[in-house]
Image: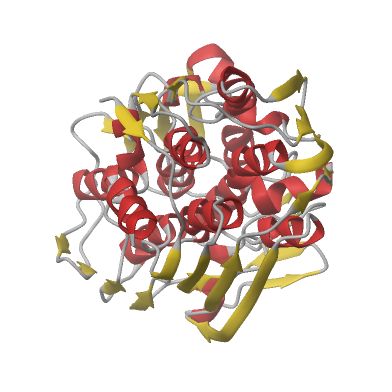
Amino acid sequence: MRMLVSEARKLKGKYLPPPDKSITHRALLVGALATKGFRIINPLLSDDTFSTIRCLKQLGKPIEINHKEIVISPDEWREPEEILDCGNSGTTARLLTGLLARQPFFSVLSGDQSLRKRPMRRVVEPLVRMGAKVSGRNGDSLLPIAIKGGPLTGIDFKLPVPSAQVKSAVILAGLGAEGPTVIRESIRSRDHLERMLSWLGTGITRENGLIRVPGKIEIEGGEISVCGDFSSAAFFLVAALLIPNSDLVIEKVNLNPTRTGLIEVIKRMGGRVEILDLEYKCGEEVGNIRVQHSALKSTQIQDEEIPGLIDEIPLIALLATRAVGTTIISGARELRFKETDRLKAMARNLGAMGAVVEETEDGLIIAGPAELRPSKLKSFGDHRIAMTMTVAAAITSGGSTEIEDFDCVSISYPEFISDFRRLADG
């Protein structure tokens, strides 16, 4: 599907983002372990989370879906009769691998063409050390992978890259292992699973870069309420910064510090953004954000910042096109292994719109400010690229921008374009 996007007048009013995708995935997997049932209030229902739901149903988990909640009933795990299709969801594939490593049966995970190119060895290696039998394509590094689960033993594991997905896979395996599992992080990554498990009373601890997972933990049941997704809200946050006369309040959004690195980047670029009404809910910080149109200056993004704003690097690249000076993004090589090579995708699209962009091995160098022009752009099948280029198109003038393969936004945010147009026209 092709989408035409024209200049937006302003973004004003209040905006409630969709539920958090990362938390919904993790709540589904934790809920599947619950021995007395589990309830998820306000889950995200998107292509990615439906991939997790379908896989869990194939594994014997009764799941009922209503508009505002998901109920997972307790039942025995069963060996799947068919290949578990993770669609485009890396979170489903990697976290489910950790969960299946502890199950006493055989299973195979696969996904779409894009997911079958994304690295899996980083998950496979620690699970094999714990005692699981896991094999896959290209030296056990690519999907499809086959898993023969069984009894596991806790390990002491240093994360080779700051990856919340790898960490979460090892935690899920460690919950069922004999003996404790220790995970060492040199750079902190998203910690939604640790917070969720701690809030549910499992005894998991986090301190000074060490995550300790007690073995043989049983989760009886519980309830998780999912707050707004910061990564989805980020598109509106950046749009309000860039579109003149904008003044937007983003409500009830996740403000977990491992997710909100974009806010710190915006502040040092001179953006007018403030946090309001901060509270705690199910172990997570939740609050409102007020953002106003702002004049921006360039900045530098360093390696240690990347985990806290990994999804927002395309948006930072867009901000840089309107900032005074040269913005340098480094340490972001991981973006080459997402749904598409996001560094290359942003360099090509922004270049087509008239920005001065240099692609490096692990980042981008962007000279600003530049006046972006309407153009024909590609999403490259990546939901975050499609949504970022929608914001880019909204700050052009003199015509419409065409974005190819726009339907990929359903992976994380099916209502994105309707929400964006409602606020832009309001």
In this rendered view, identify the residue nearer to me: 17 or 375.
375
Q: Is residue 238 left or right of residue 265?
A: left
When asked about the image quadrant of residue 15, the answer is bottom left
In this rendered view, identify the residue nearer to me: 342 or 108.
342
Q: Residue furthest top?
A: 138
When asked about the image quadrant of residue 81, the answer is top left
- In percent of width and height, residue 308 lies at 69, 54
Q: Residue furthest front?
A: 398
> At x 22% / y 45%, what residue is drawn?
54
The mark total stands at 0
Q: Is residue 70 visible?
A: yes
- In percent of width and height, residue 171 lies at 57, 57
When asked about the image quadrant of residue 407, the answer is top left
Tell me the quarter of the image containing the N terminus.
Answer: top left
Residue 301, relative to residue 283: is it above or below? above
- In percent of width and height, residue 88 lies at 37, 32
Residue 118, relative to residue 23: is it above or below? above
> At x 51% / y 35%, what residue is drawn?
396
> At x 46% / y 41%, what residue is drawn?
394
